[in-house]
Amino acid sequence: MKSDQEIKILREGGQKLSLILKKLTKLVKPGVDAEYLDKIAFDLISECGGKPSFLNYQPDFADKPYPNTICVSVNETVVHGIPSKEIVLQEGDLVSLDIGMKYKGLFTDMAVTVGVGKISSQLEKLTKVTRESLNRAIKAAKVGNTLGDIGYAIQNYVEKNGLAIVTSLVGHGVGYAPHEEPAVFNFGTPGRGLKLEPGLVIAIEPMVTFESGAVKEKEDGSFVTINGQVACHFEHTIAITKKGPTVITR
């Protein structure tokens, strides 16, 4: 649970992070390599007085520290794609940029998925549905509701549109560390789970694909869809307040 003053600092950091990610998305085009995006992200975070929260971070679920500033996950890679010079963006790709920052001692986290050049109508739909599922989850993130209400808002909208939730990867609490309790599932039952109270800060991050949400972890720690189909990922850091959900990273 975060104090009003901590939420104010988180908003300050979150707004800076959002502007950084906006600048990065404008650099996404055919021929750009992922390592270049990572370097720009590091420079922009440093310039605004922050520190990359992913760089050299080793969560409980990882075998080794993460070696980069951002995650660049292309096509079938759902999350934790490690940026390298070898990953060169191609026309028609779908790429998720996931970024976290420590600012004035507190952590924010966000992600967007963007098309590289012109993408297919299928991928346009995948992107729109995933983004809207996050919007619906945010609306459900109000005092008196539960984590189950958030998960249901995502699951119900995604499945109504004929797409599949990646169920084994989740959102999380955030603020004092890059990952905190509680786990924020992208599926759920209304009224079930932890009750939302003022001061709770969580990262909501739907991950959506076609047909099957089954994933596997590769040796480098990235997660890919088992069927090789393209995945999409959006994320915001949200504060639960008496006045309603506040999007920290907007």
Image: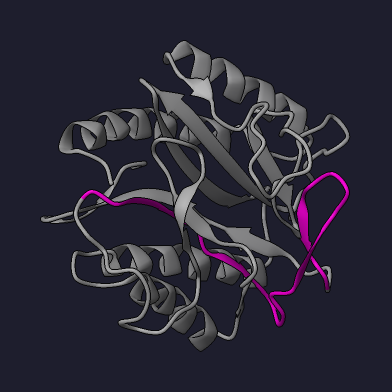
- Give the camera-side residue of 228 and 125: 228
Above or below: residue 24 compared with residue 132: above
- Give the camera-side residue of 192 and 77: 192
Who's the residue at 38% across and 52% down the image?
202
Q: Is residue 220 magenta?
A: yes
Q: How many marks?
A: 0
| Residue 60 screen position, x and y as percent | 65, 46
- Name the quadrant containing residue 162: bottom right
| Residue 30 screen position, x and y as percent | 75, 40
Above or below: residue 6 compared with residue 143: above
- Give the camera-side residue of 37 and 181: 181
Q: Is residue 47 magenta?
A: no
Q: Is residue 32 visible?
A: no
- Name the quadrant containing residue 143: bottom left
Tell me: 104 left or right of 233.
Answer: left
Tell me: 200 left or right of 169.
Answer: left
Q: Residue furthest left?
A: 243
- Give the camera-side residue of 122 and 213: 213
| Residue 13 screen position, x and y as percent | 35, 28
Who's the residue at 53% across and 49% down the image?
112
| Residue 104 screen position, x and y as percent | 35, 20
Q: Is residue 85 visible?
A: yes
Q: Quadrant of the C terminus?
A: top left
Tell me: 167 left or right of 203.
Answer: right
- Name the quadrant containing residue 197: bottom left
Above or below: residue 154 compared with residue 249: below
**Range of residues picked out in magenta:** 199-226
Colour option used: one colour
Who's the residue at 72% across and 25% down the image?
36
